Amino acid sequence: QVQLVESGGGFVQAGGALRLSCVVSRNIDNFHTMAWYRQAPGNQREQVAAMTIIGLTDYADSVKGRFTISRDSAKNTVNLQMNSLKSEDTAVYYCAAKLSRLGSFDYWGQGTQVTVSS
């Protein structure tokens, strides 16, 4: 069983920054894609950022230029650096991993709350 454990969420004022981390119980190089999703109350879960095994990245338009996804294979960790935070970034953030290029994500973390006050 693969476990993903997020940390780094919290309360921050608008304009501030947070760094989320996701520690994976398996070598992350076994996964084709690692990603961060978020879900705000009343909204659907949306993909915020993703990174493939070869380093290709993809970001939601709403976070481009503000968020950066990175991976540290030596630590089996995926990070999300969030700068210039806005109140609309408030959500539960989830780490996800999938084994193949196609299909849905296979594994999910339990989520970490990010609250941005305006």
Image (spheres, rainbow, N blue to C red):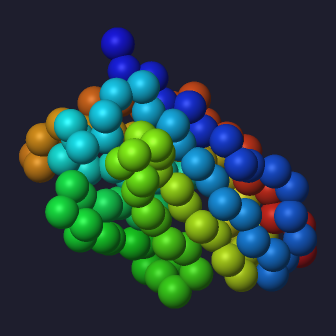
Instruction: Measuring from the top left, give residue 91's x and y in whole percent.
Output: 67, 52
Can residue 96 be seen in the rendering of this structure? yes
Instruction: Measuring from the top left, give residue 82's x and y in whole percent.
Output: 63, 70
User: 102 above or below 105?
Assistant: below
Give the left or right position of residue 30, taking residue 37 as reference.
left
Which quadrant would residue 90 be assigned to in this image?
bottom right
Instruction: Measuring from the top left, give residue 47's x and y in whole percent.
Output: 41, 57
Which quadrant would residue 76 be assigned to in this image?
top left
Residue occupying image coordinates x 67% and y 77%:
83
User: 27 above or below 39?
Assistant: above
Residue occupying image coordinates x 30% and y 70%:
57
Total marks shown come to: 0
Which residue extends farthest bottom? 65
Residue closest to the eye, 42 or 108: 108
Which quadrant would residue 71 be assigned to in this image?
bottom left
Residue occupying image coordinates x 37% and y 21%:
2
Give the left or right position of residue 54, taking residue 108 as reference.
left
Residue occupying image coordinates x 66% and y 60%:
19
Dividing the image into 4 quarters, which one contains the N terminus? top left
User: 4 above or below 44?
Assistant: above
Which residue extends farthest top? 1
Give the left or right position of residue 12, taking residue 40 as reference.
right
Dividing the image into 4 quarters, which one contains the C terminus? bottom right
Give the left or right position of residue 112, taking residue 73 as reference.
right
Residue closest to the eye, 102 or 76: 76
Instruction: Measuring from the top left, give residue 58's x and y in whole percent.
Output: 32, 71
Can residue 45 be seen in the rendering of this structure? no
Which residue extends farthest front? 74
Residue closest to the eye, 52 or 104: 52
